[in-house]
Image: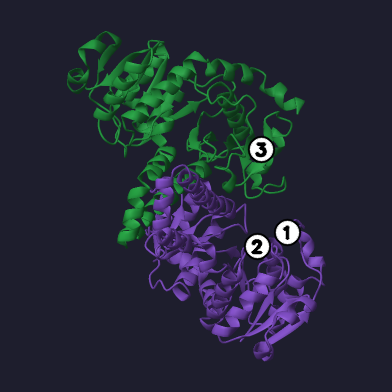
Chain colours: A green, B purple
Amino acid sequence: MKIAVDVMGGDFGATPIIEGTIEALKEEDFSAILVGDSSVIESKIPLSLKDRVEVVHCVDFIKMDDLATNAIRRKESSIFVATDMLKSGQAHALVSAGHSGATMSLATLRVGRIAGVSRPAIGAILPRIDGGVVLLLDAGANVDCKPEHLYEFALMGDIYAKSILGYSSPKLGILSNGEEECKGDELSKEAYALLRGHPSFIGNIEGDNLFDGSVDVVICDGFVGNIVLKTSEGIADAIVHLLKNFIQESSVSKMGALLMRGVFRKLKKRLDYAEYGGAPLLGVGGNVIICHGKSNPKAIHNAIKQAILAHQRQVNKKIAEAFEGKEELKSNK
Amino acid sequence: MKIAVDVMGGDFGATPIIEGTIEALKEEDFSAILVGDSSVIESKIPLSLKDRVEVVHCVDFIKMDDLATNAIRRKESSIFVATDMLKSGQAHALVSAGHSGATMSLATLRVGRIAGVSRPAIGAILPRIDGGVVLLLDAGANVDCKPEHLYEFALMGDIYAKSILGYSSPKLGILSNGEEECKGDELSKEAYALLRGHPSFIGNIEGDNLFDGSVDVVICDGFVGNIVLKTSEGIADAIVHLLKNFIQESSVSKMGALLMRGVFRKLKKRLDYAEYGGAPLLGVGGNVIICHGKSNPKAIHNAIKQAILAHQRQVNKKIAEAFEGKEELKSNK
């Protein structure tokens, strides 16, 4: 299988993306199509891997502060070229750490949506205290949603959790301001009514249930999803910042922190998004993994692993089948 | 000044609420009206404080799983009686750790809204890394909002930050999925347009800015606000849980944790909601502080301090004045 990797547009340039691809090539079974500046890429690929790497030269790329809506006209840009390789079947999956809005809109417009899907969604994969993960979608693709969209996110998230995350019977919840059915805003309450009767649906969940293992797939609109993700990052950063400052205030605590290095290493690893790879874009007719702009080599490696799994386990085919029967599913509830 | 304290309906019964009131009476200058079961209250009040405590006997109360909408018919309940003491002027402020929906709807219906306020809002006070606090509103009173409501929350939050939190020029932001003006859902973008030109307004902020000191007052609808609060609690709990587990895995790290006791104590104190008291209900014509159902005596004491400040600094009068000029403010933008 061939994976197209957009090496341009990440916050730290091409190097960590190329390095992550090399790491992945050493451990996983695939060929890479590296799309970007060949003068940067060529020198970094070890001779032993050259036969598994194709370089597609592109120098233009979408900058983080460019408008996503302009991406469709930037036909020379790395993400445009990489997306078209996915569209034409030259690549079986696409991994990008560039402008996520551009990746999303190009994938939607050029590759196209799976029949029956109104809005593709980004699925963020977050760590839980029990060592498992929770899939949150939509994590930012769609800010204004209708109940029907949330219903679709639920169907896609359920399939992703079963196929990729290893949950044979995922617990699927709607993120709300209370557990009771009567809680929620208009959008979430109508989505609740649509999901009632879905075999994975466990009802509303609250923000403090996100990480405690009580739910595997969490549904919300992309406005709420983005805010929840950023808030989680913010509070984790704040706690780490406070700990570091308090430790510096006494030599006893500095000694304690030294003895606790192993604990902090484990905590960092557990909270590190790089461990979980990227976020799948669900609902388009190709395997797309959107990575954090600040992705390090490990994050890219893990994103490529996700892309390989998505292809092998035919996530999109399963989503297409579910959406063929969508109307039926809803009327059965 | 007199503060009515609803001693019923908290998650841990009347005891922590009575104890918190006693702590406050020892340190602050006010009289307490304790509304609840006198057979429980009387025995707990020290003789030396008896002349500053009035007990209003009530045994009925709204349970946490009762519907808020039924509270208006429960005229014998402690929160109904306490709210009516605020309404009649017998009390200058009300503190309750009971059913927050019931407190909110009774305060709104019985005491009434300040002229010009369409929707009272709950302001949550959260710790920041710089030792300051951030006021988040609405924290859960109004799940479906119009842009006009968010504009009103902003006016009230701005006044509260100036009068009570000590920010002479508060930085006020809208919680959104990106900093740029073009980011946001329909609601937040329209609220942005209404707030443009407001002297405190700094634009959109993201979830990871909540705790980093870049903003003093954050505006969102109550659905998002509740989810943000609970998510913050959830991730803080998750990190503490992971730390405890990892520490148990080796004797070296147990020793380290022992040396770091002071650090953990400081962190706990900084994150402890009890340090910040309760959440003001802004927009009703009386001083109302809504406390966490799990409030300990310290939280009740701090909530009473907030109530005293709100009365002394005439927050509601200032809100009323701002709302008299509201149309003018908006047309000046």
Q: Residue furthest front?
A: B251
Kind of residue at disc 3: Ala
Residue A14, visible in the rendered structure: no
Q: Residue at x 39, y 63 (%)?
A: B171
B144 w.r.t. B56: above or below: above
Seen in the image, is B15 located left or right of residue A250?
right
Q: Which residue is mark 3?
A: A191
Image coordinates of residue B195 in percent, x first then y, are: 45, 60
The residue tagged with tag 3: helix, strand or loop? Answer: helix
- Other-residue count near label 1 (Cα within 10 Å), few / some / many at <14 / 14–19 / ≥20: some
Q: Which sits earlier in the primary sequence, circle 2 or circle 1?
A: 1
Asked whether disc 3 touches disc 2, contact meaning CB atoms under 8 Å apart, the reply is: no
Which chain does tag 2 point to?
B
Q: Which residue is mark 1?
A: B64
Task: Give the amino acid at mark 2.
Answer: Gly
Of the residues tagged 1 and 3, which is closer to the observer? 1
Name the amino acid, label 1: Met
Relative vertical location of residue A166 with respect to residue B111 in this rendering, above or below: above
Q: Nearer the viewer, residue B141 or B268?
A: B268
Q: Are marks 2 and 1 in contact (CB under 8 Å)?
A: yes
Residue B255 placement, left or right of A34: right
Q: Quadrant of residue B81?
A: bottom right
Q: In which quadrant is the N terminus of chain A drawn?
A: top left
Categorize mark 3 by other alpha carbons within 10 Å: few (<14), some (14-19), many (20+). many
Label 1: element kind: loop
Q: Badge 2 is on which residue?
A: B293
State the image coordinates of residue A305 (x, y, percent, origin top left).
42, 21
